[in-house]
Image (cartoon, helix red, strand yellow):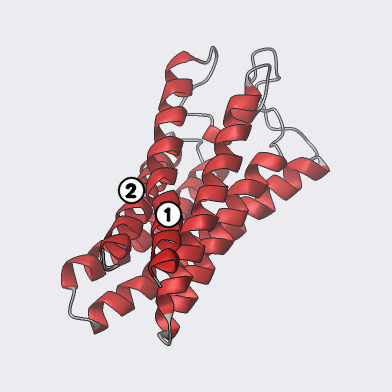
Amino acid sequence: MKDKAEQTRLLLTGGVLAGPIYIIVGIAQILTRAGFDITRHPLSFMSLGDLGWIQIANFIVTGLLVIAGAIGLLRLALADKRLRRGALLLGIYGLGVVGGGVFVSDPALGFPPGTPDTYPQTMSWHGLLHFIFGQIGFLALIVASFVYARYFAANDLPGWAIFSALTGAIFLFAIIASVATSAGDGSAWGLLALYAAVTLAWIWLAALSYHMRSELAP
């Protein structure tokens, strides 16, 4: 039992570390990659160009860490259906992040430098898979946050319930806003809202993994 608890604690540590790694590596690239504009380019564009391997590795490593954390959460689920569903949904999110690294997006909007300053007229097969993996992952994360909100509310943990529900609500709003603005006047606020929501989601996931890890008997 002690060995199993240690293995579970190690798996949950993966969930704790995924967010900080993703955010730190992302910020470092935003500050240093030539031609990248946070008001126009999603972070997935960092997978393109000579230094694209950095973001590809960031996607794959953090996605695998999320999957490890989800396995740890699943081990804690026991007979609780909400915890099982939440863990499985987070595992799907982790697969979405890995898929986002394996299948890169198409060059667009002047990035990498030298790319036409428009969206491509047709989407490549890997660009399409990148989009599909990303949307499935985002949807799974949003649903997972609401599942955990219900779990925490049922277990008289209102702070965690509100944190989880707000994370899902803000993420959903940001996705809608980013789609609406990209189809409209091209305003930057929708994309910036998505950046903020993704950052919040990674923070929530790290905090959730740490909280559940602390519930394990030492």
Left or right of residue 108, residue 184 in this image: left
Q: Which mark is residue 10?
A: 1
Residue 168 percent location from the top left of the image: 38, 62
Image quarter of residue 209 = bottom left
Q: Is residue 207 above or below residue 92?
A: above
Left or right of residue 19, residue 140 in this image: right
Does any portion of residue 42 appear in the rendered image? no
Label 2 CA crowd tier, 10 Å (few <14, some 14–19, many 20+): some
Residue 83 percent location from the top left of the image: 41, 76
Regarding mark 1 in the picture, which secondary structure is present there?
helix
Q: Nearer the viewer, residue 92 or 173?
A: 92
Number of marks present in the image shown: 2
Residue 41 percent location from the top left of the image: 54, 30
Q: Is residue 53 above or below residue 64?
A: above
Q: Which mark is residue 203?
A: 2
Specify which label sits upstream in the sequence, 2 or 1: 1
Alpha carbon distance from label 2 to label 1: 19 Å
Give the residue at x 64% y 44%: 100
